[in-house]
Image: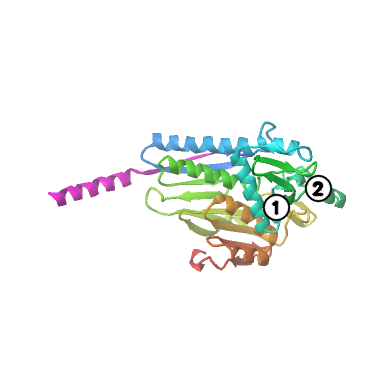
Amino acid sequence: MIRLKFLIAINFFSLSVIAQSNYKRALQLMGCDFEITVVAENPEKGQAAIALAVDEVRRIERLISSWDPNSQTAAINRSAGIRPVKVSAELFQLIARSKKISRLTDGAFDITSSSMDKLWRFDGSMKHMPTLQEIESAKAKVDYRNIVLDHEKQTVFLKRQGMKIGFGAIGKGYAADKAKRLLVENGVKGGLVNASGDMSAWGRQAGGDDWTVAVTNPLNKKAVFAFFPLRDRSAVTSGDYEKFVEFGDKRYSHIINPKTGYPAQGVISVTVLAPKAEIADALATSVFVMGVEAGLHRINQLPGVECVIVDDQGVVHRSAHLQAKKL
């Protein structure tokens, strides 16, 4: 009798696993394409879980958007060189982590690079290169070390007037992490948040397979460059093939080197795998700016982080931690 009950329990368990399905929704959030996939027992639970994630991403957008005049980020930028601004603990901590990543990457990642937004536009409206004077003027406002954080008062102060902070190189990853965390807390056993290429995965798909990220071949956008299994990990790819401008026969990517004021050169694609999308997002941008040698050296020093770099000659470079079988 005991054995029979055990077999019945196994059968019920198998049925519950079979009943699980993947439910997916694609939509525009934070000005880009999002796709949220969850594993659930039925469409109602699946869509309810996705709605939770969508609301969380929209909350993050209201918090970090520099374009929304009512956001705390916009208030910080308006008060640059004038006075400190008290912010929420969440935003304060995100800015503090951003400064740490800036130190880790020797300034290759810098949320004050937003001061250069008006110089470089990748929406088709840019007709000529910025002048050297314009570049130098914008660079003078870029330096993460001029972000003053008062931990006791929880205030943020930008030392120089005209300085701006922006979260374009970390915000989507952060939003993906927060959406994932909320879904996990609400009992969703598996899912994938794809924030326009910033991917955060947990658990397994309904059929038991790992989540897999396909990386676009930077030399042929219609082909897949590589597949990576995501097991409770995140993956982010930065490339020059989506947003760029061309002057003469030279392509300039949307990823700006904070130290030079010009778009980064020498790399056309960086994919970073890390425990969190936030750090993968920031590091992908950083490695793109740092270049192959310095970028690989820094990634090799970070436990649990891997990367693949494609240089402007089409040569593939891998970090020491990345297993060859993944390519």
Extreme residue in the front direction: 152
Q: Secondary structure at mark 2?
A: helix
Q: Secondary structure at mark 1?
A: loop
Classify residue 44 as left or right of residue 297: left
Considering only order in the chain, which callout, 2 or 1, is on the residue closer to the N terminus? 2
Q: Is residue 19 magenta?
A: yes
What residue do we see at 73% from left, 51% from top?
Answer: 145
Distance in Å between CA atoms under marks 1 and 2: 15 Å
Quarter-wise, where is residue 257 in the image? bottom right
Amino acid type of disc 2?
Ala
Q: Position of residue 2 (x, y in %)?
A: 15, 50
Q: Residues within 10 Å of mark 1 (few under 14, many from 20)?
A: many
Q: Tag count in the figure?
A: 2
Residue tagged by mark 1?
Answer: 255
Residue tagged by mark 2?
Answer: 138
Q: Is residue 182 magenta?
A: no
Q: Which residues are magenta?
A: 1-26
What residue do we see at 54% from left, 62% from top?
Answer: 303
